Amino acid sequence: MTGVTRNRSTKRVTSVDRFLTVIRVVMASLIIIGILAFIAQQIDPNNPFARWRNPGARGLTGDQFKGLLISGLSQGSMYGLIALGYSMVYGVLGFINFAHGE
């Protein structure tokens, strides 16, 4: 084979790649700030970080937190089952068939 091979380390970085990287970093940092604010609010609703993110917020009670956790896990498991079903249908048929849904 006498053709010229390209080295993967010389991949060209476009402006779209840079833009998407910036978007990823911004979204990840916003998610991390939100999670930290939620945890800080649950530990002490009067701390400055929690008041900065959500001034009128109060902490959740234990029952509210358990309900939130259970509903989040159940909704996430339903999404997982739906995705598993679609991937099984796609694996068998080669395309996703939406005709059987109502």
Image (cartoon, rainbow, N blue to C red):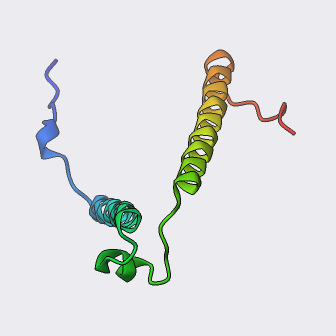
Which residue is found at the position 13% from the left and 45% from the top? 10
Classify residue 90 by image quadrant: top right
Which residue is found at the position 30% from the left and 80% from the top? 48
Residue 78 location in percent, x, y? 65, 36
- Count the marks: how many? 0
Q: Image height check: is 91 above or below 8?
A: above
- The one nearer the camera, 6 or 67, is 67
- The one nearer the camera, 53 or 47, is 47
- Quadrant where the C terminus lies? top right
Q: Image height check: is 6 above or below 22?
A: above
- Quadrant where the N terminus lies? top left
Q: Image height check: is 99 above or below 62?
A: above
Residue 39 location in percent, x, y? 37, 60
- The one nearer the camera, 29 or 3, is 29
Q: Image height check: is 58 above or below 102?
A: below
Residue 36 location in percent, x, y? 33, 63
Which residue is found at the position 62% from the left and 46% from the top? 71
Classify residue 8 by image quadrant: top left
The answer to whether residue 16 is left or right of residue 10 is right
Considering every residue shown, the one lying at the far right of the view is 102
Considering every residue shown, the one lying at the far front of the view is 62
The answer to whether residue 88 is left or right of residue 100 is left
Residue 32 location in percent, x, y? 33, 60
